[in-house]
Amino acid sequence: MTDTWFLATLWLGLAMLATLLSIWLRIATALSEIVVGTVAQLIIGAVISSSVLGAHEPWIKFLAGTGAIILTFLAGAELDPDVFKIKWKEATALGIAGFVAPFLGCAALAYYVLGWDVRASWLAGVALSTTSVAVVYAVMLETGLNKTIYGKVVLAGCFINDLGTVLALGLIFAPFTIRTLIFVGVSVVVFAVLPYLTPRFFKKYGNRPSELETKFLLLCLFGMGALAGWAESEAVLPAYVIGMVLAGTVGKDHVLIRRLRTVTFGLLTPFYFIRAGSFVSVPALIAGYGVFLILLFGKMATKFVAVYPVTKFYKSPGKEAMYTTLLMSTGLTFGSISALFGLSHNIIDTAQYSFLIAAVVGSAVVPTLIANAFFLPWHLLRSADQEQASASKPTGESFPLEEGESI
Amino acid sequence: MISKVLIAYDGSQQAERAYEFGLDMALKYGAQVIVLSVARPPEPPVNVELQAVVESATEHYHELFNELKAKAAVREIEPQFEVRVGHPAEQIVHFAEENGADVIVMGHRGESFLQRWLLGSVAKRVLSYAHCTVVVVR
């Protein structure tokens, strides 16, 4: 048991380091944890032994897997079901466009250009088809579009996009046996019953220190995850859908969601993201950086080609269509889950996994950097009309600073 | 004539000084005071974490606003408090324009080189793009 405590101390130490880095650099904790996992494995592997980190220990696998499942559930629970009910056609069109184009485009790119085998190519398509709901949501919050119908439709579209990703991940690699049929059948029943049963059950027995709500949700998530695993599917598929179907009930219980977040961020997701980072091979990445660039370009190009026309068709306000499209980048959560699924099921090798993780991280970071470096000043500059209108107002003189000048 | 003072507040010592300065200015001109705090999402925003960060920052600022209210009450000023989400510079500039602020008062934090490179200096961007006078309190 002593070894376990030592290993747990090492992992929590890395998690602390990653969190401090994320605070100092103001970057996402998940990103920081992936990078810390990669660097730690590189250094520890070179200095001592690659097995020291113990990423294949069953209890680390369990904590990491639970982290992925609960994180996926919480991501699904952020859906606003009311908007989806009103504007489901637009949201579905946007979501399908956002999923299908990068899925098929990146899979084709991997197969025809990079020469990957069929299963690895499909997995590349899945990993790069996801959209970061959070990136789009942040833009919506910043521009105030989250309160408009347009903003809500785009957000609902992102959920549909991610649903496409988890469905593809859960079903494409499944063998389609009687087990798959049982898994799908039970899932449909559970997804239909849970929104009715859960709030009533919580109302009768919930709100006690014994945390019945958390236990019930974990029971459902683990149970469906086990069934998915038995059917050779993926546990995050039912977790995401359970999150979505409970978004209108459990998702609105802020206290419960906060308690789940505490255990998720405090213990579980560090294991998941550090572990995901530890499998990245830096030498392979350096040797084949061109592959990473091709995947990154393919992802951004296909997403742009598909999403931009749809946002314009649904009359997105001017610049925001371009901005939203640019920021419909790959989410770290589903992108890394897909890549890790591929690695653990021997669909892709370590080098391919490294390229995919790098492309996922790149497509999450690059649009944000572009937006900060170039789009922000554009966004701040007022139009000529506004300038003219305000010319008559007594305002302070503006004096743009030269680049590099500090105050 | 200054009738509306916008104070950008992030809870730092520099922001405290800017707040005091802004209150004095408002008292002198008999101006209305608006205090704006900005919750900054992590870069890049990540599912679930973003919602958690925004909620926690908003709650944190609302607690700080209670202390600010007490300080303003001594001067018989009743500021209006707001929390926005996004890049601080962008939100400060937009909010100032939307609300017709005559002056923006803000502190200047010593951001690291990496933060400036990744996100840019907040004060520099506000100075560059604000429609009105900007006072950076040191």
Image (spheres, coloured by chain):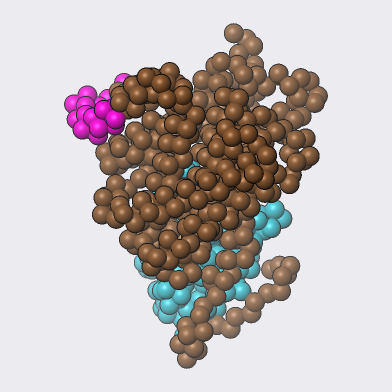
Residue B54 in view here: no
Closer to the camera in the image, A273 or A22: A273
A262 lies left or right of B126: left
Seen at 40% across and 35% down, the residue is: A240
**In magenta stretch: residue A205:** yes
| Residue B93 placement (x, y as % from top left) | 51, 70
Closer to the camera in the image, A49 or B28: A49
Q: Quadrant of residue A317?
A: bottom left
The correct choice, above or below, for A312 with respect to A36 in the image is: below
The extreme right residue here reads: A47
- Magenta region: which residues? A188-211
Seen at 47% across and 48% down, the residue is: A100
Examine the residues drawn in magenta and state their main secondary structure.
helix
Seen at 48% across and 62% down, the residue is: A308
| Residue A300 placement (x, y as % from top left) | 58, 54
Closer to the camera in the image, B131 or A358: A358
Residue B90 in view here: yes
**In magenta stretch: residue A169:** no
Position of the N terminus of chain A by quadrant = top right
Closer to the camera in the image, A300 or A272: A300
B137 lies left or right of A87: right
Seen at 60% across and 80% down, the residue is: A398
The colour one sees for chain B in the rendered image is cyan
Q: Quadrant of residue A115?
A: top right
Q: Which chain corresponds to the colour brown?
A: A
The extreme top residue here reads: A1
| Residue A164 placement (x, y as % from top left) | 43, 42
Q: Quadrant of residue A397?
A: bottom right
| Residue A145 placement (x, y as % from top left) | 40, 62
Position of the C terminus of chain A by quadrant = bottom right
The correct choice, above or below, for B51 with respect to A47 in the image is: below
The correct choice, above or below, for A393 with respect to A221 in the image is: below
